[in-house]
Each structure stands twice: as structure tokens, then as C-alpha cells.
């Protein structure tokens, strides 16, 4: 069973928004064993939408479309698909009522053009939209199925999970299971050099590396009749990878470094407090992204100025005078300070030059000190994170946070 | 002149990474007046890559490809394009040397497979990669041009700006100018209802709305022979929009709310300090994303626990006992407290139930109080941000921050 993803929207085509829907749908389809060989984007243009739809159905059995279900005159996905299947449009009373109810709930006036969203092709299976006004739908005939979903990801994603996956499950004849090994501190080339034979020769399970800034994910995917069969295929391969790259693996099927940190702290019944300068609150923000972070985190101080480093974190004026705000001494005192004022088991800190301005020969952009202070481990690490790019500021802040999370995970091994 | 974007990568096709490259390239092409009618994604598969390339060249003069230039055996974009243009591959000595230099600079061993990245089709224009190992290239013949760029956005983007834009400028015959009006506090439907005639009937300039969570951007784009001509076309349309929607516009061509806040504070020579509970540092993190934020921001406290609200922000124990952490009284005292301990002109705060746990009938998930305290304006706003979705936690945090930024901008009108 082959599917194709066709996203409709001039705002996608012009690059005004990033196409997160395609990634989401592709991942969900892979999970239920449906292959995707092409993704496409077309604008809100009737002719090109028709061309795109014809092309997609020439290569695939299922075409999943997002966008163009809105209330406005240039939203024409439904009409184009109805035409493809030779269906008339009719008012769907249930959809109309739920659109009216939606506007009542969010306490905004319903505009006349919203009624267009309740017009549906005859014979469509309708997917209710609990989070917006545009219902989704499926039309199926002669082995070809079109699935139309609203463009806003916050409406599309729950609709996909709640309505489309159950609808599609009938089409799939196998089960896929994946596990994601998360690595920090190594690059994609290095990983592949080490795992070359395994990756090249494995077909079930497959092993595929995915790199993003400062991290590599190794995805091990098996296909089988049951989930248990897949797990049995995956286990020995994961063991092999752990054997070769174990030092870099910070978690399996964990969402990200901050989740690994929160889980590890919970397990050891320890708490952490953050003192941030160059990261400006990024570390506390990422820790508190994790639901339940309050079990292990109560206090973060963003001490962006020297005054606040002194008055709140008790960094000594002499230290700041003698070594400067960006120094290993200041980093150490910040970590000690936040640990002391918060009563947390572990204090961590960042201080550095995120740029683009503020660098000097002695302390260039990208120089960052990170520190940890606890009963068992106290240390400072010096990082050089400059790459000489325009977007270095966010990179330097991001990588500083990554290293702090890794430093916490390392320290927890002593507990 | 028509271009098409063809992104290559199984990791895109499977949804393991989001295709930010397509959006970036589309936007840059629009800026230099090159039309894009289709974007596509194919996997690392020779046959489908060939099919995709043939199809793209059947519809467009320029095909811009990303990905598949890596060192590994499944990276085959260059080879496929060379085949399409009937060119042999040869070692490019300059590329080889710069790859060797790159590995020296980042102090990692160069692996044997990296040499493959210096193999180039005969007759290609080569784009140096200052930020990675894969050079980019252009091949042009008989009115068809293929441009190949590395997949990692951190390598692709600077290469696009530094090498591809100058290369392509020769192809374009008009100038496009856009201005983006940023709106907060209204929805896309409402905006379009108000601007219906203007949007429907305008062709030069065009007016297009783009919605993302809690914001709408109106993009006004004109085409002309010179930038000056475009500006003259745009000015009266912007004035019309300001007349109708001025109350919601927080900036023109400003990147986002936090940048508008930092700029407005700089202009008034004022500073802000943040006291965050449910947002966990998100507000300070977003303020410090803006380069030069240190002029207006020195102190953020993430007081996630009641103890820290008392000990650092001096929220009274009685207030917490009587009204609870999520209350207008606590929000007000947090804003006052952080203003007082930091010496900033303005203090702002957030306290709420971000969920998914921790809600009650009296204080449900999504209840957030935000407060501002300054010499001229002190107030607390109660927000209900729950939508009943799985990703509500991040939504509630994000929207709380949005409202805080808007509250600061509103307060600054009194100065």
C-alpha cells in the first residue's frame, strides 16, 4: 500500500511557513506500515492542484492532502477533489452545527464564510475537527482514496491521530516497530563509519542515522506480523550498537536530553537549580517543558547582568573584577550560588559570549564556561562553540544547554 | 523564470526531520523574483530521484535540490544529476583540500568516505561549504539549471545566501519587495473578513495572511522594475490596513514579539525583569534571543516552587497560603518582587497551570495569571488558555509569553 502526501498552500510554497505537517504524517504512516515515496507542495491554484492530484494518484493508492479547507475563496482543495471523483458538494448539517458550536465555545463571532467549511462532497467520510472549524474528510473509489485534512498543525495532528489512523488501519497489512537511540557528542559520519557494515547490510531491522545540531539519532526499525516479532528482531541489533557506541547514547526512545535529565533526576530523587547567563533561561525553559519537572526543579536564575550575578547569586565582586563575567571562576560561583540559595542538590551554570557582538581576542564569541556544583561532583568545562555563521547566537546557546544536560547526566553516574 | 524545489532524503520522506530547507529556499527565491510552483521530496533512491528530476525539469527551468551530498553510499544526488546532464565525475582538488582543512579546524579525523564529497560532475560551478564538508554545485545546459546543496540547514542556508543568490540573480528579470505586518490578538478569518475586498482584488501589491499560533502576519508584496517603484505601490496599501487593523499590529518587518519588545524598551531607555513560574524561563529565553537584549534586560527568576517565590521574590507566605501560587495576588507580588530585587523599571510575571496534571475545578489547566508592575502601570490579567489538546502544555506556555510581551508593549504606550 503506497501513499503520497500533497500539501496545499501558497504560504508553504512561498516559504512563509515550514511544512511540519508532511513530517508528522510521514512518520505516522511509517508507524502503521504505509510506504511514502513522494511528498509534494502546491499553491492554492486550481490547475496546479489538479495536476498534482492526478500525478499523485498515478503513483499511489492513497493521497493525503493538507490545507485549503479554510473559509476563504482561495481554499479549494475539497472542490478539486470532488471534481476528481465526479461528486457534487452538499451542506453537511452535522459539520455546520459543530462549526457553530466551536465559535460559541471560543466566544468569537462566526463569519458568513465559515459556512463554506460545512460543504462536503457527496459520499465523503467526515472527520470532526475538535480544535478548529474545518472538518476533514475521506473520499474513496476504485481503489483510490483521498484524505483531506486542515492545514493548521494544531488541528491536523489530533485529527490524524483520532480519525485518520483508525480509518487507515484497514489498509495496512504489516506492523512496524521502531526504537530511537539518542546520541550526544559524536557526528553522523563517525557513527556511520563505526556502524558501516551493520547499516549497509541490515534490511530487517533497518538502521538509519538522523543528525541534528549536536545530536545523532539511530533509528532501528523492524517489520513483522506482530509487535513481539519486531521486538525480537530489534533487540540483538540494539545490543550491537550499544556495544560500539554506548558511551554516546544518552537514552533510548527518550524525547530529548532534557527529558533524559528530568527522568534521571527523578530516579535518584535529586533536584537541580540553574544559573544562566548566556543561555538566558533556555535551560530552565527546556527542563520545564517536561511535564512533572517540578519534582526535580524549583529554581532558575537568569543573571544576565553582573549586578544580578552578585546580588542574587552571590558571585563575589572581586571574582567579576579580576576574571570577568565570562570565566571559569564566575561559572563556578554561579553554580555554587544557585545551589546554595535554592537548596537544590545540584547547581549548574552557564556564562559565555553568545554574540554576535561582545567578543574579544581573549574572549571570543563562542567561548562558554559551564559549571556544576554538588556534594559529589564540582567542575567547570570550557567550550568553544563558534562556527563563524550568522545564526551562531542560537547555536551557541543551544549547544551550551546540550552540554549542561550531558554534564548533569554524567554527574548522576556518581550517585 | 520558474524554479522547483526537490529535496532528497529518506529522513525527510519518513518524517524524521522537518523540511525547513524548502521553506527557506522558497522564501529566498520569492525575494529575487523567481516563481516556485511545486516543491517535492523524494527518498535516497536512484530511480525515484531520476523520476523526480525529470518531472521537475518538465515543469521548470531551475531545479534546486538539497540533500544527498553526504559521504555515505546512499548519498547519490550528484551522480544522478551528472547522469541527467550526461557528465562524468572527477575529483575536484580544491574541494578535497577544503574538506581536509575543515576536519583540521574542527579537530576530528577525516574518514575515507569524506573524499567522495570532492567528486564533482565535469563542468560544474562549485560552491564552497564554509560550514561543513559537502560542497554545493550548479550544472547548467540548454536552458536547464540544477543547483545542488547540502542537506543540513546550517550548511545549506549560508551557502544559499553567499553563493546561490549571486549565481541566480542573473536569471531574474524583476524585483519583488515585501513587507510583513505582524498582528497579535486577532484570527485569520477575522482579518480576512475585514480585508476581504483588499485581498481579493489586489494583484500588485498582493496582500496575503499567514497564521501561526496566536499571531497573524499580513504580507504585502509588490513587483516592479526597482525597489523604489515597489515601495510606492506598497505604501498606500499598508496605510489602508493600518487604518482598519491598527490596534492589532505590533510591528512591521519585525521578526517577532520579543524583538518588538526589546526594540521598544531600548527606544524608551527602560529595562524589564521577569519572574516566571508556569513559563519556566521561556520569556527570559525569548528576550535574550534578541542580540543586544542586555541593554534592557538583566534579571530573570524562574520561581517554579513556592519556596523560591518566597525566598527570592519575596512573595508573602500569607498570600501563597490564602490565595495559592496560581492567583492574581501571587502574580502581582512576583512582578513587584522581581522589579524590586532587580532594580528594573518594569517587572512582569507568570503563574498558572500548564498541565497536563495539576489542574482542579477551581483552577483548571490553562488558567494563567500574568502581571506587570512599573511606576506607571500595574495590573494583572487572567487568561484561560486551555484548548483540551495533547500539546496544550507548550501552547499554554507559549501563549502566556505572547500575552506578557503584548502587555509590555501596551504599558510602554504610557511612557
Image (cartoon, coloured by chain):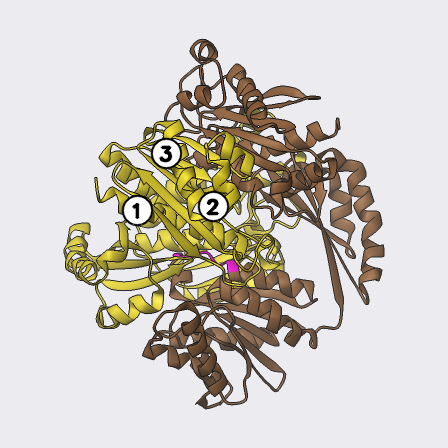
Chain colours: A brown, B yellow
Residue B250 visible within the image: yes
Marks 2 & 3, CB-CB < 8 Å contact: no
Q: Position of residue A210 (x, y in %)?
A: 63, 47
Give the Cα separation between the discs numbered 1 and 2.
28 Å
**Vertical placement of A114 versus A301: above or below?**
below
Q: Secondary structure at mark 2?
A: strand
The crowding category of the residue bearing disc 2, from other C-alpha atoms within 10 Å (few below 14, some 14 to 19, many at least 20), is many
Specify the quadrant that holds the C terminus of chain B: top left
Sequence-wise first label, 1 or 2: 1
Residue B291: mark: 3
Q: Residue at x 41, y 73 (%)?
A: A104
Q: Point out the frontmost of discs 1 and 2.
A: 2
Give the Cα separation between the discs numbered 2 and 3.
27 Å
| Residue picked out by circle 1 | B254
Q: Are marks 1 and 3 on the same chain?
A: yes
Q: Is residue B2 left or right of residue A84?
A: left
Amino acid at each position: 500500500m503506497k501513499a503520497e502526501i500533497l500539501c496545499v498552500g501558497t504560504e508553504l510554497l512561498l516559504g512563509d511557513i515550514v511544512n511540519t505537517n508532511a513530517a508528522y504524517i510521514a512518520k505516522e504512516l511509517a508507524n502503521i506500515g504505509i510506504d511514502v515515496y513522494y511528498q509534494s507542495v502546491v499553491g492554492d491554484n486550481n490547475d496546479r492542484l489538479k495536476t498534482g492530484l492526478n500525478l499523485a494518484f498515478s503513483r499511489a493508492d492513497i493521497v493525503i492532502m493538507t490545507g485549503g479547507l479554510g473559509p476563504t475563496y482561495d481554499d479549494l482543495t475539497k472542490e478539486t477533489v470532488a471534481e476528481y471523483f465526479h461528486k457534487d458538494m452538499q451542506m453537511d448539517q452535522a459539520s455546520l452545527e459543530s462549526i457553530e458550536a466551536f465559535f460559541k465555545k471560543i466566544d468569537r463571532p462566526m463569519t458568513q464564510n465559515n459556512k463554506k467549511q460545512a460543504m462536503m462532497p457527496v459520499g465523503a467520510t467526515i472527520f470532526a475537527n475538535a480544535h478548529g472549524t474545518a472538518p476533514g474528510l475521506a473520499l474513496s473509489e476504485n481503489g483510490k482514496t483521498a484524505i483531506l485534512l486542515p492545514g493548521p498543525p494544531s488541528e491536523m495532528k489530533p485529527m490524524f491521530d483520532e480519525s485518520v489512523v483508525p480509518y487507515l488501519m484497514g489498509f495496512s497489512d504489516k506492523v512496524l516497530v521502531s526504537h530511537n537511540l539518542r546520541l550526544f557528542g559524536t557526528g553522523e559520519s563517525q557513527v556511520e563509519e563505526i556502524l558501516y557494515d551493520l547499516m549497509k547490510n541490515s534490511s530487517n531491522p533497518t538502521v538509519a542515522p538522523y543528525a541534528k545540531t549536536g545530536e545523532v539519532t539511530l533509528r532501528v526499525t523492524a517489520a513483522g506480523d506482530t509487535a513481539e516479532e519486531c521486538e525480537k528482531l530489534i533487540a540483538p541489533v540494539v545490543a550491537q550498537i550499544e556495544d560500539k557506541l554506548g558511551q554516546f547514547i544518552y537514552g533510548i526512545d527518550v524525547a530529548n536530553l532534557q527529558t533524559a535529565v528530568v527522568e534521571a533526576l527523578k530516579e535518584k530523587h535529586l533536584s537541580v537549580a540553574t544559573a544562566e547567563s548566556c543561555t538566558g533561561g533556555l535551560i530552565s525553559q527546556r527542563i520545564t517543558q517536561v511535564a512533572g519537572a517540578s519534582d526535580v526543579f524549583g529554581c532558575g536564575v537568569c543573571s544576565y547582568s553582573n549586578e544580578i550575578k552578585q546580588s542574587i547569586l552571590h558571585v563575589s565582586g572581586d571574582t567579576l573584577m579580576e576574571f570577568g563575567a565570562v570565566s571559569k571562576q564566575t561559572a563556578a560561583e554561579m553554580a555554587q550560588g544557585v545551589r546554595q540559595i535554592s537548596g537544590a542538590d545540584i547547581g549548574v551554570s552557564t556564562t559565555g559570549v553568545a554574540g554576535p557582538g561582545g567578543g574579544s581576542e581573549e574572549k571570543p564569541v563562542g567561548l562558554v564556561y559551564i559549571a556544576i556544583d554538588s556534594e559529589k561532583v564540582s567542575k567547570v568545562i570550557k567550550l568553544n562553540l563558534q562556527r563563524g555563521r550568522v545564526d551562531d547566537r542560537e547555536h551557541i546557546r543551544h549547544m551550551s544547554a546540550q552540554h549542561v544536560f550531558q554534564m548533569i547526566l554524567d554527574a548522576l553516574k556518581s550517585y
